């Protein structure tokens, strides 16, 4: 593995072509496909819901399904995830109930996060999925710290941090990589290079030839892998995890992929992205590539996919309906969870609000549209 | 005079500044071809090119730090921080460098520059696309902290900020970007940021606010007038340095005062106004100085409309101080 | 009971916490073999080893960010920031992550941890080794902001902070590190940070302060007593959440109030106290609420003694409010 | 030049040994020696003054004189300096009046910075020496920005940023290197690797094999040079400057040297540094090495050095005396230069202070000792 040469398996030239990475059975391959496919369907639905004005915001991961699921499949249950906002695929793979996803999108009363954050800012404690925030990169130092904590406790658990090409410019990338490397902490840094940070192309993000090479600055191995090749991503991650668990320290993995949709439901790439570039990547669609490979291996059939699709769409529809019909959180929840207990000063603010509503009636929701 | 949204007025001010002075340069995330996520820099990259309108890597530390270097060199940088909530990775540069440069060098080095950034709620942005951080900056001597309340104010204050010798944090009330419209003079003009603006004269209650809250306060004042309460509305414009004199003079007349803001309450600029008014107007005050503000919680998503002060909440406070005895 | 300096009391508290709970870990610059630049962690590296007392690379962003990760994992990290002035490179982690973690995750993830850092003037450290930044933190819902005023208070408040479920910014008044001495109980005990401490009872004037200012206020109170002015001194202990009740009750009794701090004046915690007192005690106040504070300038070097409030400045304010009519 | 192999000239094996870098005449060599030697004497005096309690704080650069003067000699007058606190040598080389240095150490009324900053935090506008602050690394982004500004204006000026091994961990290192590289800005990043960040050794600062290698992460050349070899440092810097002026972008230079004194007047290295390590570096003292080389070339004589020393000590003594007898800044200067004009709110604070002093007398200076 290398920081400059790109690992490929799916349709790589030569001997790699067609091999199945060690440890993967047909059922695994099918599960990987299923997860990628499900993500695509979910994203289409999420974007639609936003276009219809039913939810305020959505972040799809069109084109990045292999980069995500390859990694997700390499993780162990006990591992700890420090995800970005563009990563719902792995939560689904780890078995998160779809209702949680849509409850969060609506920020309703049953949302795990109590309607306090924008859509796509999930927290799923039952799968060690840490709470997502918007500031780019902040989770990277958390992952390094959690990995150090596992080391201190003597636990064999690996922390995974996800971020984009843009995220490599953040303060926390620099600090997180450096601390983890000095500590030789069991941490894997996943850089999804989807070529864009909103409208800023990768060559304006960094003058380095690759993002994987940034590992050199920290004395850490850097691996560059074809991010539209789910098997290559899986293998690179698996090896990095083995290293981490063996006490050999952290790894930076760059998955080279492409954002095949807008940055989010608020973005219009036509202002800054050429049609040709988009089309050249469409040809490398990670689902299409994996499907073709599986078909060649006779693991995939059209009938299987059709059945999957039907089931999945039904599942999504049910979850959407349930979430949409759940009311918003109660007003007094606004004051919970700032501190472990509500202090007197905040109780007073709460009482004043409740008193005002009692006297002058409900507060009108005037809305507002998210631009980004 | 053409009618402009605040976004258009800001875009216009930037274009005028860049045309007037070759040293004015801009840098930030997505401000180039995309024209900014809100469109404030629309068209400027095409007009002024790569060297004067620079898309940058994703680092607010880098944006502010390199802008300081440009200012030290003699340019007039106008960096954009995509959301005020994302200014914190560059906070050290603001507090330790930008604010203290003139003082620490005995006046020999200065960094006049304007950090533009959308601030406040109104777009369903949750914790991280809605905060009003003015108190952090207003507690930092050496900075100017400015926030406009209408399109005309935005244009005049932005031009005044750019052609000013101090570093300015220019907070743009994103709720008004598209939802405010006003006739605005064409061409170059400035608005005096050292003076607060009396947006409405009145004799019963003084209400101080800034940014997007001003229009809400104006609505509340109009409704209060129907009930016979004559509200004087002060648009603060600048939070550091701030024009205590105008406020004090008003409260000496009205005897009652309210400060209205979106930010959390504790250690806020509303607290500063209340403390100062209570001290300076002790002889004329006929009621406690009330603060209407965001709660001491993070900015929420689903309940944004409950968190942000609205007309009812302001009216409630007006009633409270007007009827105090 | 042994007599301890504040430094010793803090060192003692850290040792007790680490002995009591294996999950308590420390990280920071120079806290290992060197024992910290002030010596607060002296001997702890030798006693608890590399895994629990970690020297780190020079990055406050890394120190606070990785400490949050450790807290999320279940440890109880107590990071040290070498000077409060150097916390700003990690300010984003404090404001965006540490403060909001519990709220944003619906209470599912929390990061109880204590960021210890020396604060305030008193060592001729100029701009960058002297600042009092409490207002930045006290304006950030979700944080606890605590500052002790004596060795005993330091030990009890630090232990209370470590074994507490919220993230705490623990500001250590470096001026008192070596210059304060007091008898301090041995072993584990805590001090209630939710309650302000009445350091001296009096009936004429209430003076609120915290950290190193408390002993200066106590000196001033003693001198005022000679002139027949009976001062009640309140040591705030915590600035967020803060105990307004104790202050209000005191001012209802004395009718006069002063807030004393080292920090710059505008948008400060003294402003918060003044605003709240003016609002809540409007009927009992017999004088304006005065603020004695650092000036709205950076912290100077040669004129440090002029910048920091001293006994004379406090007495001046006591005279002012006591004689107000 | 290379990021992993170390450039050496002074006593390098093979053909480099003894060669004089292009462009240096005997007078240049003597000027370089003089500047190194002067720095050493000044530092000894500064430390003494602090020990005697006459100034509050001092930062010496014992052992780093070659690393600094080699670079200082490679700069052009029009270049812009973004120095660290450990770099007075270059200000002296550029002709700064010694009185400025001691006025600043005393923070007296004639100090360029008006007594507002700790000792060693100089600002020397007449030599483009930017104002120094204490937070580590903040000047690095400034240098990148100034370099970009030169590029925008079309000026052929180079910006130089100085920082230590510890400084490479800062946010600003990451951002400054990245921005400068993306912009191909004329900027030189000087990392003085003196092996310590106060008590933290370089191997706890970064797991990378060298600091020069960190350049890879930014797509920028990195050069590792013997920092106790003034000629090697000069040559590396000269080449980097030529590249910068030619529009070829920034360079990171790591000078491998050693802090042969305490971190500052407040530090005691015996707690964390072995005597053996110190002694091994003492043998590589950059002044001794250069002296030996010059002696071999017959450029140096003992007499010349003795005369130099006498002159220099006299010069220092005069400057010390003048600075010490200059009074502190006037109290009302406290309020100047916060903003371009003093605003009403601050005028009021000033008036209140002046009024109080008028009524209750002068404010007592209670002192305080710096620990770090
Ligand atoms: C600190 C910070 N600055 C700016 C933003 C606004 N922003 C949101 S996403 C984004 C681009 C992120 O790009 P990348 O890291 O490549 O991730 P991707 O969206 O491509 O997955 C930006 C600039 C932010 N969220 N946080
Ligand atoms: C942001 C910040 N954190 C901590 C400090 C305290 N501090 C002063 S010097 C220093 C070590 C610097 O080491 P290095 O960068 O290697 O420079 P050197 O002193 O060795 O020249 C530290 C930690 C500081 N000044 N700024
Ligand atoms: Mg990206
Ligand atoms: Mg060093």
Image: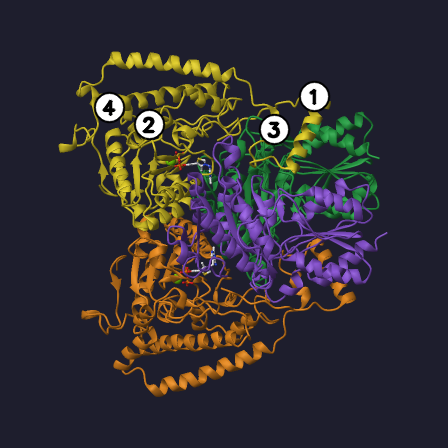
Chain colours: A yellow, B green, C purple, D orange
Same chain shared by disc 3 and disc 1: no
Q: Which residue is mark 3?
A: B179
The image quadrant in which ligand 4 is located: bottom left
Q: Would you place residue D57 above or below residue B16 in this image?
A: below
Question: Can you tell which quarter of the image residue D342 is in?
Answer: bottom right
Q: Which residue is mark 1?
A: A361
Q: Is residue D286 left or right of residue B286?
A: left
Q: Report crowding for label 4: few under 14, some 14 to 19, many 20 or more residues within 10 A (C-alpha).
A: some
Q: Earlier in the sequence, mark 4 or mark 1?
A: 4
**In the rendered image, is residue A196 in sight?**
yes
- Taking the view exactly as shown, the residue that stands out farthest to the right is C325
Question: Can you tell which quarter of the image residue B206 is in?
Answer: top right
Kind of element beneath mark 2: loop
Q: Earlier in the sequence, mark 4 or mark 2?
A: 4
Q: Which residue is mark 2?
A: A63
Q: Which residue is mark 4?
A: A29
Question: Disc 4 sits on a residue from what chain?
Answer: A
Q: Is mark 4 within 8 Å of ligand 1?
A: no
- Foreground mark, 2 or 3, reads 2
Same chain shared by disc 3 and disc 4: no
Kind of element beneath mark 4: helix
Image x and y of residue A163, in percent:
38, 37
**Is the Cβ of the residue at disc 4 closer than 8 Å to that at disc 1?**
no
- Taking the view exactly as shown, the residue that stands out farthest to the bottom is D303
Image x and y of residue D288, in percent:
32, 77
Image x and y of residue A19, in percent:
16, 29
**Is the Cβ of the residue at disc 2 closer than 8 Å to that at disc 3?**
no
C23 or D346: which is nearer to us? C23
Image x and y of residue A37, in percent:
32, 21
Q: Is residue D123 left or right of residue C300?
A: left
Which residue is rendered at x = 25% and y = 43% of the image?
A4
């Amino acid at each position: 593995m290398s920081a400059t040469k790109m690992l490929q398996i799916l349709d790589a030239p030569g001997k790699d072509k067609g091999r199945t990475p060690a440890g993967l059975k047909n059922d695994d391959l099918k599960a990987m496909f299923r997860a990628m496919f499900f993500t695509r369907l979910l994203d289409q639905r999420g974007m639609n819901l936003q276009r219809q004005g039913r939810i305020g915001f959505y972040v799809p991961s069109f084109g990045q399904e292999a980069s995500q699921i390859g990694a997700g499949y390499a993780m162990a249950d006990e591992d700890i995830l420090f995800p970005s906002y563009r990563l719902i695929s792995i939560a689904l793979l780890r078995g998160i109930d779809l209702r949680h996803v849509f409850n969060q999108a609506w920020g309703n009363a049953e949302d795990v996060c109590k309607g306090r954050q924008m859509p796509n800012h999930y927290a799923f404690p039952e799968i060690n999925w840490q709470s997502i925030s918007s500031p780019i990169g902040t989770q990277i130092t958390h992952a390094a710290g959690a990995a150090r904590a596992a080391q201190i406790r003597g636990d064999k658990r690996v922390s995974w941090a996800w971020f984009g090409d843009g995220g490599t410019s953040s303060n926390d990338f620099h600090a997180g990589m450096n601390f983890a490397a000095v500590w030789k902490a069991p941490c894997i840094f996943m850089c999804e290079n989807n070529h864009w940070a909103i409208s800023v192309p990768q060559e304006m993000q960094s003058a380095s030839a690759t993002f994987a090479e940034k590992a050199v600055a920290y004395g850490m191995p850097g691996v560059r892998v074809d991010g539209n090749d789910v098997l290559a991503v899986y293998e690179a991650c698996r090896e990095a995890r083995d290293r981490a668990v063996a006490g050999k320290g952290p790894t930076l993995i760059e998955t080279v992929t492409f954002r095949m949709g807008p940055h989010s439901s608020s973005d219009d790439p036509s202002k800054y992205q050429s049609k040709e570039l988009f089309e050249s990547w469409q040809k490398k669609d990670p689902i299409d590539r994996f499907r073709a490979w599986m078909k060649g291996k006779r693991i995939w059939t059209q009938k299987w996919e059709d059945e999957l699709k039907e089931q999945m769409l039904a599942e999504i529809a049910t979850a959407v309906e349930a979430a949409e019909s759940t009311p918003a959180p109660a007003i007094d929840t606004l004051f919970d969870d700032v501190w472990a207990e509500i202090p007197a000063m905040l109780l007073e603010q709460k009482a004043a609000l409740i008193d005002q509503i009692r006297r002058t009636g409900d507060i009108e929701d005037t809305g507002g549209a998210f631009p980004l | 005079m053409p009618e402009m949204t605040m976004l258009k007025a800001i875009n216009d001010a930037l274009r005028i500044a860049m045309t007037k002075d070759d040293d004015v340069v801009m840098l930030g995330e997505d401000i180039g071809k995309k024209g900014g996520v809100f469109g404030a820099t629309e068209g400027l990259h095409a007009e002024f090119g790569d060297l004067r309108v620079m898309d940058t890597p994703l680092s607010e530390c880098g944006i502010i730090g390199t802008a300081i270097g440009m200012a030290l060199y003699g340019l007039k940088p106008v960096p954009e921080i995509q959301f005020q909530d994302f200014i914190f990775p560059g906070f050290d540069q603001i507090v330790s460098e930008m604010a203290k440069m003139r003082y620490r060098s005995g006046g020999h080095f200065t960094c006049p520059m304007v950090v533009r950034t959308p601030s406040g709620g109104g777009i369903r942005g949750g914790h991280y696309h809605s905060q009003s951080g003015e108190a952090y900056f207003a507690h930092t001597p050496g900075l100017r902290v400015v926030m406009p309340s209408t399109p005309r104010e935005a244009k005049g204050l932005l031009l005044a900020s750019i052609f000013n010798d101090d570093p300015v944090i220019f907070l743009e009330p994103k709720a008004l970007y598209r939802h405010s419209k006003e006739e605005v003079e064409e061409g170059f003009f400035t608005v005096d940021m050292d003076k607060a603006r009396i947006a409405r004269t009145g004799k019963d209650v003084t209400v101080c606010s800034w940014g997007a809250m001003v229009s809400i306060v104006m609505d509340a004042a109009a409704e209060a007038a129907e009930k016979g309460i004559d509200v004087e509305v002060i648009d603060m414009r600048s939070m550091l340095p701030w024009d205590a004199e105008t406020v004090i003079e008003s409260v000496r007349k009205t005897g009652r005062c309210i400060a209205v803001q979106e930010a959390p309450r504790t250690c806020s600029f509303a607290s500063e106004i209340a403390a100062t008014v209570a001290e300076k107007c002790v002889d004329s005050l006929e009621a406690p100085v009330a603060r209407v503000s965001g709660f001491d919680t993070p900015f929420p998503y689903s309940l944004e409309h409950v968190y942000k002060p609205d007309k009812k909440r302001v009216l409630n406070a007006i009633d409270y101080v007007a009827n105090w005895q």
